[in-house]
Amino acid sequence: MTIIGVESIITPMREIKLEAEDKFPPKELIAKCYAVINSSRITNLPEVIVTKDNMVTLGLLPDMVVIMGGATAAFKIRIMCWISAAIAVVCAWVFSWWILVVALVAIVIERKIAARSEETWKFLAAVLLSLEVLANDFAGWGTARPDAMRRAIVVMGYKRQAWLDYILPRRNEINKEELMQKFGPA
């Protein structure tokens, strides 16, 4: 029994042939994009990342599927911690104030997971930004790695500039030599 339309989705994915050993996108580019995102002080990354285009793009990269699953699990654990803290507060009110220690522990755990989760969202944003940098040949990355540029265009589906516009809205004002020196490929 076959599902109609599944083969049309699976066939292009087989043609992409993304393998974990390929280092795609390049680690050096992801590190530079991560530094840019980290310095941009964006606060609403989950809202910006969780769009149809971004999720499909990340879903085509096998390593990112695992990372997105971890981000989802972390969110569920955070919700569980808040529910546990609320239950502990109610139980402390009914039984004994010592039960508030459980609420305190649950809130500390939630905050630790939230900090780690923020790093995960920054990494996912860095991957999306690095794909756009490759696809649009920003700072010479596509010229330096033409195979990676072609793969980035295939993974993204087209040359879009949403992340470049969001993270670096005035990139045309940047000095080209300084940009190549600081952000370009080595």
Image: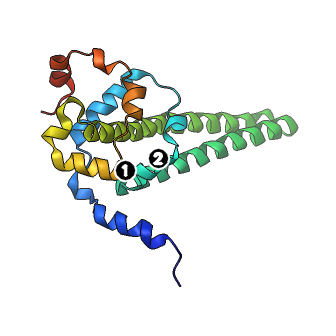
**Placement of 52 over or under 161, stated as above or below:** below
What residue occupies the far bottom of the structure in this picture?
1
Measure how far apart labels 1 and 2 are at the Cα level: 9 Å
Count of numbered marks = 2
Q: Position of residue 128 (x, y in %)?
A: 37, 40
**Placement of 112 over or under 55, stated as above or below:** above
Query: Toward which corner of the image does residue 96 lie, by quadrant?
Result: top right
Which residue does the image show at 47% across and 49% down from the upper left? Answer: 55
Query: Of the residues under marks 1 and 2, which one precedes in the sequence?
Result: 2
Provide the secondary structure element on which disc 1 rests.
loop
What residue occupies the far right of the structure in this picture?
94
Q: Nearer the viewer, residue 113 or 43?
A: 43
Which residue does the image show at 49% across and 53% down from the upper left? Answer: 69
- Please give the label number shown on residue 92: none
Q: Position of residue 97 (x, y in %)?
A: 79, 33
Mark 2 surroundings within 10 Å by alpha-carbon count, few (fewer than 14), some (14 through 19), many (20 or more): few
Mark 1 surroundings within 10 Å by alpha-carbon count, few (fewer than 14), some (14 through 19), many (20 or more): few
Provide the secondary structure element on which disc 2 rests.
helix
1 or 2: mark nearer the eye: 1
| Position of residue 94 in the picture relative to residue 145 (left or right) | right
Evaluate if marks 1 and 2 touch, with contact meaning CB atoms under 8 Å apart.
yes
Protein image colouring: rainbow
| Position of residue 137 in the picture relative to residue 61 (left or right) | left
Which residue does the image show at 21% across and 29% down from the upper left? Answer: 139
| Residue type at the position of mark 1 | Gly
| Residue type at the position of mark 2 | Asp
Which residue does the image show at 31% across and 28% down from the upper left? Answer: 35
Residue behind mark 2: 53
Q: Quadrant of the C terminus?
A: top left
Q: Position of residue 124 (x, y in %)?
A: 40, 41
| Position of residue 75 in the picture relative to residue 116 (left or right) | right
Residue behind mark 1: 157
